[in-house]
Image (tube, coloured by chain):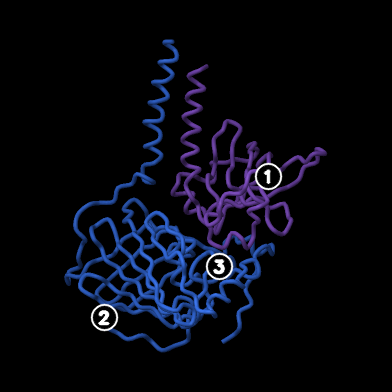
Amino acid sequence: MRTNRFLIGAGFLVAATLAGRSVAAHHSFAAEFNASKPVTLKGSVTKIEWGNPHIWVYLDVKDDQGSVQQWQCEGGPPNTLTRNGWTPNSLKYGDQVTIDGVLAKDGSKTCNARMVKLPDGRSVFAGSSGGDNPPPPKP
Amino acid sequence: MKKRLVASVLTALAVAIVCPMLAAGQQDYRPPAGPAPRSASGKVDFSGVWQKPYVPDLTKDGKDFKGVAELPFTPWGEAEWKKYDAAEGDYTGACLPFGMTRSVNTPEPMQIMQSDTYFAFLFEQNSWFAVAPIDGREHRKGIPTWFGDSVGRWEGDTLVIDTVNFNGKTRLDTIGHPHSDQLHVIQRFSRPDRGHISHEMIIDDLKTFTRPWKTTRTFTLRTDWEMMEYSCEENNKSLWEGRIKVPKFKPF
Protein backbone atom coordinates (compact mmCIF):
# COMPACT_ATOMS: atom_id res chain seq x y z
CA MET A 1 0.00 0.00 0.00
CA ARG A 2 2.79 2.33 0.99
CA THR A 3 4.64 1.32 -2.15
CA ASN A 4 1.63 2.35 -4.21
CA ARG A 5 1.51 5.70 -2.50
CA PHE A 6 5.18 6.28 -3.22
CA LEU A 7 4.76 5.35 -6.85
CA ILE A 8 1.73 7.58 -7.20
CA GLY A 9 3.81 10.31 -5.62
CA ALA A 10 6.55 9.73 -8.17
CA GLY A 11 3.99 9.84 -10.97
CA PHE A 12 2.64 13.10 -9.62
CA LEU A 13 6.17 14.52 -9.61
CA VAL A 14 6.52 13.60 -13.26
CA ALA A 15 3.17 15.19 -14.05
CA ALA A 16 4.16 18.33 -12.20
CA THR A 17 7.41 18.46 -14.18
CA LEU A 18 5.46 18.29 -17.39
CA ALA A 19 2.98 20.84 -16.18
CA GLY A 20 5.72 23.37 -15.66
CA ARG A 21 6.55 23.43 -19.33
CA SER A 22 5.09 26.41 -21.10
CA VAL A 23 2.74 25.89 -23.98
CA ALA A 24 2.33 29.14 -25.68
CA ALA A 25 -0.33 31.25 -27.21
CA HIS A 26 -0.65 32.24 -30.82
CA HIS A 27 -2.36 35.43 -29.76
CA SER A 28 -2.65 37.85 -26.90
CA PHE A 29 -4.04 36.00 -23.90
CA ALA A 30 -5.47 39.20 -22.45
CA ALA A 31 -7.57 39.80 -25.55
CA GLU A 32 -9.84 36.89 -24.68
CA PHE A 33 -9.35 35.80 -21.07
CA ASN A 34 -9.34 37.43 -17.67
CA ALA A 35 -6.40 36.19 -15.60
CA SER A 36 -8.01 37.60 -12.45
CA LYS A 37 -11.05 35.32 -12.78
CA PRO A 38 -9.92 31.78 -11.97
CA VAL A 39 -12.32 28.88 -12.26
CA THR A 40 -12.23 25.20 -11.31
CA LEU A 41 -14.50 22.92 -13.30
CA LYS A 42 -15.23 19.29 -12.46
CA GLY A 43 -17.05 17.40 -15.14
CA SER A 44 -17.25 14.73 -17.78
CA VAL A 45 -15.49 15.08 -21.12
CA THR A 46 -17.92 15.18 -24.04
CA LYS A 47 -15.58 16.09 -26.90
CA ILE A 48 -11.98 16.92 -27.81
CA GLU A 49 -11.14 19.14 -30.78
CA TRP A 50 -7.51 18.63 -31.72
CA GLY A 51 -6.96 21.47 -34.17
CA ASN A 52 -5.06 24.68 -34.66
CA PRO A 53 -4.57 27.18 -33.27
CA HIS A 54 -5.58 25.54 -29.96
CA ILE A 55 -7.15 22.33 -28.78
CA TRP A 56 -10.56 22.55 -27.09
CA VAL A 57 -11.92 20.31 -24.36
CA TYR A 58 -15.70 20.20 -23.93
CA LEU A 59 -17.23 19.00 -20.72
CA ASP A 60 -20.53 18.68 -18.91
CA VAL A 61 -20.42 20.26 -15.48
CA LYS A 62 -23.15 20.00 -12.85
CA ASP A 63 -23.93 23.31 -11.19
CA ASP A 64 -24.99 23.80 -7.58
CA GLN A 65 -28.59 22.93 -8.47
CA GLY A 66 -27.55 19.71 -10.15
CA SER A 67 -28.35 20.81 -13.69
CA VAL A 68 -25.77 20.09 -16.36
CA GLN A 69 -23.94 23.03 -17.91
CA GLN A 70 -21.90 22.69 -21.07
CA TRP A 71 -18.43 24.25 -20.88
CA GLN A 72 -15.57 24.61 -23.35
CA CYS A 73 -11.94 25.15 -22.44
CA GLU A 74 -9.03 26.15 -24.63
CA GLY A 75 -5.70 24.32 -24.33
CA GLY A 76 -2.35 24.61 -26.03
CA PRO A 77 -1.46 24.33 -29.71
CA PRO A 78 -1.58 20.76 -31.05
CA ASN A 79 1.94 20.91 -32.46
CA THR A 80 3.53 21.77 -29.13
CA LEU A 81 1.37 19.25 -27.28
CA THR A 82 2.35 16.57 -29.79
CA ARG A 83 6.05 17.30 -29.26
CA ASN A 84 5.45 16.96 -25.52
CA GLY A 85 4.00 13.49 -26.00
CA TRP A 86 0.25 14.13 -25.92
CA THR A 87 -2.21 12.81 -28.47
CA PRO A 88 -5.91 13.37 -29.14
CA ASN A 89 -6.47 10.08 -27.29
CA SER A 90 -4.78 11.24 -24.11
CA LEU A 91 -8.24 12.27 -22.98
CA LYS A 92 -11.38 10.33 -23.88
CA TYR A 93 -15.11 10.81 -23.97
CA GLY A 94 -16.50 10.24 -20.49
CA ASP A 95 -13.26 10.90 -18.62
CA GLN A 96 -13.91 12.71 -15.36
CA VAL A 97 -11.63 15.73 -15.19
CA THR A 98 -10.90 18.74 -13.07
CA ILE A 99 -9.86 21.80 -15.03
CA ASP A 100 -8.14 24.75 -13.40
CA GLY A 101 -8.28 27.78 -15.63
CA VAL A 102 -9.48 31.31 -16.06
CA LEU A 103 -12.72 32.60 -17.49
CA ALA A 104 -13.28 34.28 -20.82
CA LYS A 105 -14.01 37.99 -20.68
CA ASP A 106 -17.31 37.68 -22.55
CA GLY A 107 -19.08 35.82 -19.74
CA SER A 108 -19.69 32.69 -21.79
CA LYS A 109 -19.04 29.22 -20.39
CA THR A 110 -15.54 29.33 -21.82
CA CYS A 111 -12.25 28.95 -20.03
CA ASN A 112 -8.55 28.85 -20.70
CA ALA A 113 -7.32 25.61 -19.18
CA ARG A 114 -4.16 25.92 -17.11
CA MET A 115 -4.39 22.30 -15.91
CA VAL A 116 -6.53 19.31 -16.81
CA LYS A 117 -6.38 16.62 -14.12
CA LEU A 118 -7.72 13.11 -14.01
CA PRO A 119 -9.03 11.61 -10.75
CA ASP A 120 -5.81 9.64 -10.27
CA GLY A 121 -3.82 12.86 -10.19
CA ARG A 122 -2.35 12.67 -13.65
CA SER A 123 -2.33 15.89 -15.64
CA VAL A 124 -3.37 15.80 -19.27
CA PHE A 125 -2.47 18.31 -21.95
CA ALA A 126 -0.35 20.06 -19.35
CA GLY A 127 0.19 23.71 -20.11
CA SER A 128 -1.89 26.64 -21.14
CA SER A 129 -2.27 28.84 -24.12
CA GLY A 130 -1.60 31.73 -21.76
CA GLY A 131 2.15 31.44 -21.98
CA ASP A 132 2.63 35.18 -21.87
CA ASN A 133 0.51 35.62 -18.80
CA PRO A 134 1.25 35.10 -15.12
CA PRO A 135 -0.59 32.25 -13.38
CA PRO A 136 -4.02 33.22 -12.09
CA PRO A 137 -4.36 34.02 -8.40
CA LYS A 138 -5.75 31.35 -6.10
CA PRO A 139 -9.49 31.65 -5.54
CA MET B 1 10.93 -1.37 7.91
CA LYS B 2 11.86 -3.68 5.08
CA LYS B 3 8.73 -2.64 3.18
CA ARG B 4 9.61 1.01 3.63
CA LEU B 5 13.10 0.40 2.28
CA VAL B 6 11.70 -1.43 -0.75
CA ALA B 7 9.23 1.38 -1.33
CA SER B 8 11.95 3.99 -1.14
CA VAL B 9 14.13 2.09 -3.59
CA LEU B 10 11.20 1.67 -6.00
CA THR B 11 10.37 5.34 -5.75
CA ALA B 12 13.95 6.34 -6.45
CA LEU B 13 14.03 3.97 -9.40
CA ALA B 14 10.75 5.32 -10.75
CA VAL B 15 11.99 8.89 -10.55
CA ALA B 16 15.44 7.99 -11.91
CA ILE B 17 14.05 6.05 -14.86
CA VAL B 18 10.80 7.79 -15.74
CA CYS B 19 11.88 11.40 -15.41
CA PRO B 20 14.84 11.15 -17.82
CA MET B 21 12.66 9.24 -20.28
CA LEU B 22 10.07 11.98 -20.26
CA ALA B 23 12.68 14.65 -20.40
CA ALA B 24 14.48 13.02 -23.31
CA GLY B 25 13.93 15.08 -26.39
CA GLN B 26 12.68 17.92 -24.24
CA GLN B 27 14.63 19.65 -21.50
CA ASP B 28 17.70 17.38 -21.60
CA TYR B 29 18.06 17.29 -25.34
CA ARG B 30 21.66 17.66 -26.42
CA PRO B 31 22.30 19.15 -29.85
CA PRO B 32 25.10 17.69 -31.95
CA ALA B 33 28.59 18.98 -31.22
CA GLY B 34 31.27 20.07 -33.64
CA PRO B 35 32.09 23.07 -35.77
CA ALA B 36 29.55 25.03 -37.78
CA PRO B 37 28.96 23.38 -41.15
CA ARG B 38 29.78 25.23 -44.33
CA SER B 39 28.35 25.16 -47.81
CA ALA B 40 30.35 24.14 -50.85
CA SER B 41 31.14 27.80 -51.40
CA GLY B 42 32.63 28.05 -47.90
CA LYS B 43 29.86 30.10 -46.30
CA VAL B 44 28.51 29.18 -42.87
CA ASP B 45 25.38 27.11 -43.44
CA PHE B 46 22.52 27.87 -41.05
CA SER B 47 20.19 25.24 -42.49
CA GLY B 48 18.27 23.13 -40.00
CA VAL B 49 15.26 23.02 -37.69
CA TRP B 50 15.84 25.43 -34.83
CA GLN B 51 14.29 25.72 -31.41
CA LYS B 52 13.83 29.37 -30.48
CA PRO B 53 13.08 30.89 -27.09
CA TYR B 54 9.49 32.03 -26.65
CA VAL B 55 9.60 35.80 -26.30
CA PRO B 56 6.17 37.27 -25.56
CA ASP B 57 7.70 40.45 -24.10
CA LEU B 58 10.90 41.94 -25.49
CA THR B 59 11.54 43.78 -22.22
CA LYS B 60 11.83 40.61 -20.13
CA ASP B 61 14.87 38.34 -20.15
CA GLY B 62 14.27 34.61 -20.31
CA LYS B 63 16.01 31.37 -21.09
CA ASP B 64 18.19 31.92 -24.17
CA PHE B 65 16.93 35.50 -24.47
CA LYS B 66 18.15 38.89 -23.35
CA GLY B 67 15.88 41.82 -23.92
CA VAL B 68 15.83 45.54 -23.15
CA ALA B 69 14.13 46.35 -19.87
CA GLU B 70 13.36 50.01 -20.64
CA LEU B 71 12.44 50.71 -24.23
CA PRO B 72 13.51 54.19 -25.37
CA PHE B 73 10.11 55.38 -26.57
CA THR B 74 9.56 58.62 -28.39
CA PRO B 75 6.41 60.49 -27.30
CA TRP B 76 4.61 58.97 -30.29
CA GLY B 77 5.80 55.47 -29.39
CA GLU B 78 4.86 55.92 -25.74
CA ALA B 79 1.38 57.02 -26.69
CA GLU B 80 0.96 54.06 -29.03
CA TRP B 81 2.05 51.70 -26.28
CA LYS B 82 -0.22 53.19 -23.63
CA LYS B 83 -3.34 53.10 -25.77
CA TYR B 84 -2.90 49.51 -26.96
CA ASP B 85 -5.61 47.11 -25.84
CA ALA B 86 -5.59 43.67 -27.47
CA ALA B 87 -9.22 43.21 -26.47
CA GLU B 88 -10.12 45.94 -28.97
CA GLY B 89 -8.45 44.11 -31.82
CA ASP B 90 -5.89 41.34 -31.97
CA TYR B 91 -4.53 40.74 -35.44
CA THR B 92 -2.72 37.55 -34.41
CA GLY B 93 -5.85 36.15 -32.85
CA ALA B 94 -7.51 36.83 -36.19
CA CYS B 95 -4.77 34.73 -37.83
CA LEU B 96 -3.40 37.70 -39.75
CA PRO B 97 0.36 37.56 -40.38
CA PHE B 98 2.48 37.95 -37.25
CA GLY B 99 5.22 39.85 -39.10
CA MET B 100 8.94 39.29 -38.78
CA THR B 101 9.65 40.04 -35.12
CA ARG B 102 6.65 38.18 -33.66
CA SER B 103 7.34 35.19 -35.88
CA VAL B 104 10.90 35.03 -34.58
CA ASN B 105 9.48 35.37 -31.04
CA THR B 106 7.19 32.34 -31.31
CA PRO B 107 8.00 29.14 -29.42
CA GLU B 108 7.26 26.99 -32.42
CA PRO B 109 10.40 26.00 -34.33
CA MET B 110 11.79 27.64 -37.42
CA GLN B 111 13.48 25.84 -40.26
CA ILE B 112 16.19 27.68 -42.15
CA MET B 113 16.95 26.72 -45.72
CA GLN B 114 19.91 28.40 -47.33
CA SER B 115 21.68 28.51 -50.65
CA ASP B 116 24.27 30.91 -52.00
CA THR B 117 21.36 32.96 -53.35
CA TYR B 118 18.62 32.79 -50.72
CA PHE B 119 18.04 32.49 -46.98
CA ALA B 120 14.57 31.25 -46.14
CA PHE B 121 12.83 31.55 -42.77
CA LEU B 122 10.25 28.76 -42.57
CA PHE B 123 8.19 29.51 -39.49
CA GLU B 124 6.05 26.70 -38.11
CA GLN B 125 3.76 29.30 -36.56
CA ASN B 126 0.89 29.46 -39.03
CA SER B 127 3.16 27.89 -41.70
CA TRP B 128 4.46 31.30 -42.73
CA PHE B 129 7.73 32.03 -44.47
CA ALA B 130 10.02 34.90 -45.44
CA VAL B 131 12.75 34.70 -48.07
CA ALA B 132 15.77 36.97 -48.24
CA PRO B 133 18.07 37.15 -51.27
CA ILE B 134 21.65 37.05 -49.99
CA ASP B 135 23.45 37.55 -53.29
CA GLY B 136 23.95 41.28 -53.05
CA ARG B 137 20.61 42.47 -54.34
CA GLU B 138 19.13 45.72 -53.07
CA HIS B 139 15.75 46.00 -51.36
CA ARG B 140 12.78 45.82 -53.67
CA LYS B 141 10.50 48.85 -53.94
CA GLY B 142 6.96 47.77 -53.52
CA ILE B 143 3.82 47.74 -51.44
CA PRO B 144 4.63 47.56 -47.73
CA THR B 145 3.99 44.13 -46.28
CA TRP B 146 3.47 42.33 -42.96
CA PHE B 147 6.89 40.66 -43.06
CA GLY B 148 8.64 43.51 -44.88
CA ASP B 149 11.31 43.11 -47.54
CA SER B 150 14.47 41.29 -46.53
CA VAL B 151 17.91 41.11 -48.09
CA GLY B 152 21.07 39.61 -46.64
CA ARG B 153 24.79 40.22 -46.75
CA TRP B 154 27.82 38.56 -45.20
CA GLU B 155 30.10 40.24 -42.69
CA GLY B 156 32.75 37.55 -42.33
CA ASP B 157 30.97 34.49 -40.95
CA THR B 158 27.99 36.54 -39.78
CA LEU B 159 24.94 36.74 -42.03
CA VAL B 160 23.08 40.03 -41.69
CA ILE B 161 19.43 40.02 -42.72
CA ASP B 162 18.11 43.54 -43.23
CA THR B 163 14.35 44.07 -43.39
CA VAL B 164 12.40 47.23 -44.28
CA ASN B 165 9.13 48.22 -45.97
CA PHE B 166 6.79 46.99 -43.25
CA ASN B 167 3.10 47.89 -43.37
CA GLY B 168 3.05 49.03 -39.75
CA LYS B 169 0.11 46.80 -38.81
CA THR B 170 2.01 44.37 -36.64
CA ARG B 171 3.32 44.53 -33.10
CA LEU B 172 6.85 43.74 -31.98
CA ASP B 173 5.76 41.11 -29.46
CA THR B 174 2.75 39.34 -27.98
CA ILE B 175 2.29 41.87 -25.23
CA GLY B 176 1.93 44.51 -27.92
CA HIS B 177 4.95 46.80 -27.97
CA PRO B 178 4.45 49.09 -30.96
CA HIS B 179 6.40 50.05 -34.03
CA SER B 180 5.72 52.25 -37.02
CA ASP B 181 5.85 51.76 -40.76
CA GLN B 182 9.40 53.13 -40.53
CA LEU B 183 10.56 49.97 -38.78
CA HIS B 184 13.93 48.65 -39.86
CA VAL B 185 14.91 45.24 -38.46
CA ILE B 186 18.47 43.97 -38.59
CA GLN B 187 19.10 40.34 -37.69
CA ARG B 188 22.64 39.08 -37.28
CA PHE B 189 23.09 35.31 -37.47
CA SER B 190 26.29 33.59 -36.42
CA ARG B 191 26.88 29.92 -35.65
CA PRO B 192 29.48 29.42 -32.90
CA ASP B 193 29.15 25.64 -33.23
CA ARG B 194 27.05 23.07 -35.02
CA GLY B 195 24.32 23.01 -32.40
CA HIS B 196 23.65 26.72 -31.91
CA ILE B 197 22.90 30.02 -33.60
CA SER B 198 23.67 33.31 -31.89
CA HIS B 199 20.98 35.72 -32.98
CA GLU B 200 20.90 39.48 -32.58
CA MET B 201 17.88 41.53 -33.52
CA ILE B 202 18.26 45.29 -33.78
CA ILE B 203 15.10 47.38 -33.79
CA ASP B 204 15.64 50.66 -35.59
CA ASP B 205 12.51 52.81 -35.77
CA LEU B 206 13.12 56.46 -34.95
CA LYS B 207 9.43 57.30 -35.07
CA THR B 208 8.77 54.92 -32.20
CA PHE B 209 12.14 54.81 -30.40
CA THR B 210 14.76 57.47 -29.80
CA ARG B 211 17.60 55.09 -30.70
CA PRO B 212 18.09 51.58 -32.08
CA TRP B 213 18.10 48.79 -29.50
CA LYS B 214 19.13 45.18 -29.56
CA THR B 215 17.96 41.82 -28.25
CA THR B 216 20.02 38.65 -28.24
CA ARG B 217 18.97 35.02 -28.23
CA THR B 218 20.32 31.52 -28.78
CA PHE B 219 18.69 29.03 -31.12
CA THR B 220 19.29 25.30 -30.66
CA LEU B 221 19.51 22.83 -33.51
CA ARG B 222 16.79 20.15 -33.13
CA THR B 223 17.83 17.14 -35.13
CA ASP B 224 14.95 15.25 -33.47
CA TRP B 225 12.23 17.61 -34.71
CA GLU B 226 10.50 17.95 -38.03
CA MET B 227 8.34 20.86 -39.02
CA MET B 228 4.60 20.39 -38.68
CA GLU B 229 1.69 22.03 -40.44
CA TYR B 230 -0.02 24.82 -38.48
CA SER B 231 -3.23 26.13 -40.00
CA CYS B 232 -4.37 28.96 -37.78
CA GLU B 233 -7.76 29.19 -39.45
CA GLU B 234 -8.52 25.51 -38.92
CA ASN B 235 -10.50 25.91 -35.71
CA ASN B 236 -10.20 29.52 -34.61
CA LYS B 237 -13.27 29.38 -32.40
CA SER B 238 -12.21 32.38 -30.39
CA LEU B 239 -12.57 34.57 -33.45
CA TRP B 240 -15.66 32.87 -34.84
CA GLU B 241 -17.49 33.13 -31.52
CA GLY B 242 -16.59 36.79 -31.12
CA ARG B 243 -14.25 36.63 -28.16
CA ILE B 244 -11.40 37.99 -30.29
CA LYS B 245 -11.91 41.06 -32.45
CA VAL B 246 -10.27 41.88 -35.76
CA PRO B 247 -8.46 45.25 -35.60
CA LYS B 248 -9.90 48.05 -37.67
CA PHE B 249 -6.92 48.76 -39.90
CA LYS B 250 -6.91 51.85 -42.07
CA PRO B 251 -6.64 51.01 -45.78
CA PHE B 252 -3.50 52.09 -47.62
The chain holding disc 2 is B
For disc 2, the neighbor class at 10 Å (few under 14, some 14 to 19, many from 20) is: some
**Label 1, residues with CA under 10 Å away: few <14, some 14-19, many ≥20:** many
> CA gap, disc 2 to disc 3?
32 Å
Circle 2: residue type: Asp
Q: Position of residue B200 (x, y in %)?
A: 34, 68
Q: Amino acid at mark 3?
A: Thr
Q: Are marks 1 and 2 in contact (CB under 8 Å)?
A: no
From this view, report whether residue B10 is shown above or below residue A121: above
Q: Which chain is blue?
A: B
Which residue carries the number 3 mark?
A: B92
Between discs 2 and 3, the one toward the N terminus: 3
Residue B122 is tagged as none
Q: Nearer the viewer, residue B153 or A118?
A: B153
Which color has been applied to chain A in this rendered view? purple
As drawn, is A32 to the left or to the right of B222? right
In terms of image quadrants, where is residue B240?
A: bottom right
Q: CA distance from mark 1 to mark 2?
A: 55 Å
Q: Nearer the viewer, residue B53 or B48?
A: B53
The residue that disc 2 covers is B135
Name the foreground residue: B47 vs B154.
Answer: B154
Mark 1 residue element: strand
Chain for mark 3? B
